[in-house]
Image (tube, rainbow, N blue to C red):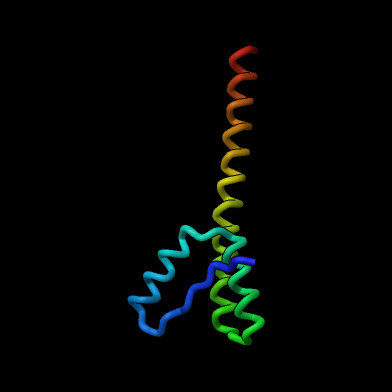
């Protein structure tokens, strides 16, 4: 299994770079990293990656609901245009 692992640095500028690189990382990659660090007993890293996974999931969830809202809006417009 290929894990996308990131070391969490101690200084804040390196941490900011790590977080920005995680912006492009997928939900499943974050979960895989969290599971890996759990096997190593590194609790802070596990929490970090699960938190990032949750943030990715919430953004995707919001996009999904926005698409549904737009679809209903288009259906409503089409319905009233015909009527």
From this viewpoint, which residue is outermost toward the left?
13
Give how far across and how far down residue 37 sits, in percent. Answer: 60, 79
Q: Is residue 62 above or below residue 1?
A: above
Give how far across and how far down residue 8 sits, in percent. Answer: 46, 79
Q: Is residue 43 above or below residue 20?
A: below
Q: Residue at x 42, y 64 (%)?
A: 21
Q: Nearer the viewer, residue 58 or 30?
A: 30
Quadrant of the rendering where the C terminus is positioned:
top right
From this viewpoint, which residue is outermost toward the bottom?
41
Q: Is residue 25 above or below residue 34?
A: above
Give how far across and how far down residue 10 sits, in percent. Answer: 40, 84
Q: Number of numbered discs present? A: 0
Q: Residue at x 47, y 58 (%)?
A: 24
Q: Nearer the viewer, residue 10 or 83?
A: 10
Q: Residue at x 66, y 82 (%)?
A: 39
Give how far across and how far down residue 78 sits, in percent. Answer: 61, 19
Q: Residue at x 57, y 34 (%)?
A: 70
From this viewpoint, which residue is outermost toward the top?
82
Q: Nearer the viewer, residue 52 or 4?
A: 4
Residue 71, quarter of picture: top right
Residue 34, quarter of picture: bottom right
Quadrant of the rendering where the N terminus is positioned:
bottom right
Q: Nearer the viewer, residue 65 or 39?
A: 39
């Amino acid at each position: 299994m290929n894990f996308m692992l990131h070391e969490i640095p101690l200084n804040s500028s390196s941490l900011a770079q790590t977080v920005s690189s995680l912006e492009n990382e997928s939900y499943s990659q974050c979960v895989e990293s969290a599971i890996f660090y759990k096997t190593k007993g590194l609790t802070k890293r596990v929490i970090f990656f699960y938190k990032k996974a949750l943030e990715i999931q919430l953004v995707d969830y919001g996009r999904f609901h926005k698409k549904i809202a737009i679809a209903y809006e288009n259906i409503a417009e089409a319905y009233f245009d015909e009527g």
